[in-house]
Amino acid sequence: MRGRSAATTAPCAPKLEDDLSGRDVDDKTDAAVHASYLDAARVLEEQIRVRDEARATHERRLLVTIQAYRNISDRTHREIDDTIESLPALEHIHQQLVTGGLPRARAGPLAASAGRSAAAGAVTTSIRNHPGRPTASPGPDERM
């Protein structure tokens, strides 16, 4: 078994042929190293492109979130701008919404919905139990 160096096991390591006789070893080595370099550069460029796209997407989402907070009221519109210095004000507004405004806002419609459901149930029950309500027509066995 021939010994192999650790460099040949790396993913971008040059692939050198075992038989280099009859050719200039330096030229083949240089070409293999150059090809490996180009492959590594291509992989790195792809990683950078993916990271830049992810960062741009995150920045767009953050700006949309900031705009949404600015549109809550006139006061928040004055307090918050599109800069990073507004982050403490954004965090404060977020905390107020999470601990106060949103739970109360959610509870109101849920309670109203439950009340409407109970009222609808009561109306249905009273209609069913109303004395003037016509009864179902007799079945074929009950007619005569």
Image (spheres, helix red, strand yellow):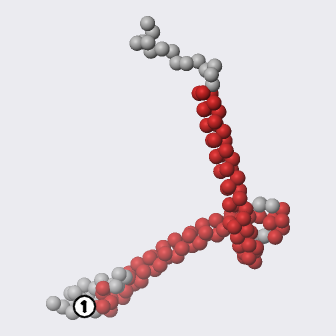
Tell me where residue 127 sits by quadrant.
top right
Question: With 73 as the anchor, is 50 left or right in this view?
Answer: left
The residue drawn where x is 37% and y is 86% is 33
Q: What is the number of callouts on the image? A: 1
Q: Quadrant of residue 131?
A: top right
- Front residue (pair 143, 3): 143
The residue that appears at 40% across and 12% down in the rendered structure is 141
Q: Relative to residue 51, is residue 89 drawn left or right?
A: right
| Residue 122 visible from this viewpoint | yes
Pinpoint residue 88: horizontal percent, then vertical percent: 74, 76
Q: Which residue lies furthest to the front in this view?
A: 131
Quadrant that contains the N terminus: bottom left
Residue lying at the far top of the rendered structure: 144
Which residue corresponds to the image point at 21% horizontal and 90% vertical from the top-left? Answer: 21
Residue at disc 1, secondary structure: loop
**Viewer-nearest residue: 101 or 64:** 101
List the residue tagged with mark 1: 4
**Picture residue at 72% right of the left edge, 65% below the top:** 100
Q: Position of residue 76 (x, y in %)?
A: 80, 66
Q: Is residue 32 above or below residue 84?
A: below
Q: Is residue 94 visible?
A: no
* Dot 1 amino acid type: Arg
